[in-house]
Amino acid sequence: MKPYRLFLILFLIIVSFGTISRFTSTKTRENIPRPGTGDFFPQAVFTRPAATDFPCYQVFDKDHNLIGYYFFTSDIVTGVSGYAGPIHLVVVIDPNGKIITAQILQHHETPGLTSSLPDFMQQLIGKNIESPLTLSDDIDGISGATITSRAVLETINQAATKVLPSLLSRKIQNESINRTRILKPDKLLLIPALTLIFILAVVGCLKKNPILRWLTLSSGFIIIGLITGNMLSLMHVAGTVLGQLPALTSQPDLYLLLFGAFITAFLLGRIYCSGICPFAFVEELLFHINKKLFKRTASPNLKTDTICRWIKYVSLILILSSSLWFAHSGLGAIEVYLTVFNGTRSIGAWLLAAAVMGASFFYQRFWCKYLCPFGAVLALFSQFKILKKRSSSSYPCTDCAECFYCDHCHSDSVLKSNRIQNNFFILATGFSVILLIFVVANSIYSITGKTPVRKTIVNEDTKAYSNIQDVLKKLEEEGITPSPAKYWRTVDHEEND
């Protein structure tokens, strides 16, 4: 059995197991932690559902004064997604609609890009949700995670449009309750632009036209890398299995890239890697600068090259397995181009990016050939492409799964390698692999080592009632007549969910 077929079988087994586990799990919904009322209102005596069409809770102190409200966005909001799926929050407001606190309970965003989330959430304290929250002078977005920042604010805005009219008896001044379900003009413009890039990339690769390839690579660098920041990643493969992809209406460009990358890979080969990927442009540019100005390009020997190309397949299996095991697609977002274009990652991630770009200066497409796990996914499907490349060369790039349409396999200079070049390549590869392992381990720790703890009411004087009749009786004794509500939930009920 060919090694490619073996890795494809392992890949399909992992994906199938993850999909089956997702749909056969006894927990049909994600276990979103829900803090108790006392975590926000230590002076609270009892909580009751508000008379709203969506779940929202009123909190009273010992003197029966209303001291605030809180709601969970997972009960209210649909269709809003961050980079890797919905972001679930608890929002606590005072009787006038000002935010007392807003906390993220669960998300699947890239761990390295969300380290600034607590500081970002602090900016929301004191803001009135009667007016839409937007990124502005007083609310700064997270550097490198604009999509995540906007998704948090849009989640709160959409929840506010549904809760506030009946809660505060005032209409929120908003553009549209369902504006997130309508494709925005800038998103609509991206679709034909990306479609054209794919078409030109296919033509450029099949015709082996270097000018056209550089045109599509530079277009991908500008549109995908600099403007949208929505590069394809192993995170999106894991998100597809886990059901953690963002909504189609929020990121149609991402779905177009995914569809185009896999269809072209199966039919024609790694078109996305060859002519569209924004980081491929960076690698090609670095290599050509060295080639033209310094003439110091290098290559490993044939044996070393062949062995090291399997590293990306091994990393694919291990990282994808980890993402599915921890049910967090963000673990798959370890590609260096996410660091380069989005920034705000760990020191290890930046060291990895620097090591990869340094090696790419001497070795053509160092990341693409040897380390990229998403490229490995496309390569597994590229082995079946209908257009087979014929070449008398024995260089690994002639393999259908490894071909970049660069035509370098026809050049004898690619096979020329001395001991210094080969040893330096081994050193650069080993160092990059160590850093890659560190980045993955750090991402896993950021998820498992800092898991939010589900708390109960911390104030000893705070009382919770689990029986509705007891609640009604207690309210009647205190002279409070509850308004009819569609949802009745207590703290104990929440703890037992």
Image: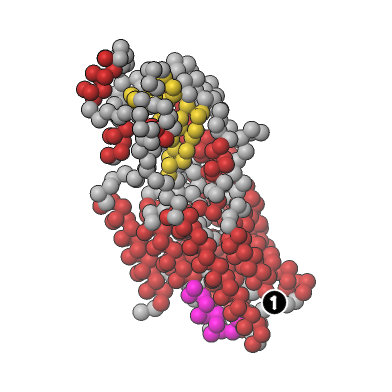
Nearer to us in this view, 252 or 27: 27
Regarding residue 434, the answer to whether it shows in the image is yes
Q: Looking at the picture, how far across and down is residue 382, in whole percent?
A: 46, 67
Nearer to us in this view, 296 or 311: 311
Nearer to us in this view, 364 or 27: 27
Magenta span: chief secondary structure: helix
Q: Which residue is drawn at 37% across and 41% down?
A: 455
* Rendered-image quadrant of the N terminus: bottom left
Image-quadrant location for residue 478: top left
Q: Looking at the picture, how far across and down is residue 195, in whole percent?
A: 54, 50
In screen coordinates, is 36 left or right of 349?
Answer: left
Nearer to us in this view, 493 or 430: 493
Check the image and report above or below for 48 versus 313.
Answer: above
Whether the magenta-drawn stretch holds residue 122 is answered as: no
What range is drawn magenta here?
300-311
For the view shown, which residue lies furthest in the right direction?
293
Check the image and report above or below for 170 versus 180.
Answer: above
Tell me which amino acid carries mark 1.
Thr
Check the image and report above or below for 484 versus 233.
Answer: above
Q: Looking at the picture, how far across and down is residue 492, in whole percent?
A: 29, 34
Q: Residue at x 49, y 70 (%)?
A: 312
Regarding residue 247, the answer to whether it shows in the image is no
Answer few, some or many: residues within 10 Å of disc 1's Cα (few below 14, many 20 plus, some between 14 and 19): some
Q: Residue at x 39, y 63 (%)?
A: 321
**Count of numbered badges drawn on the protein:** 1
Q: According to the image, label 1 marks what residue?
A: 297
Image-quadrant location for residue 432: bottom right
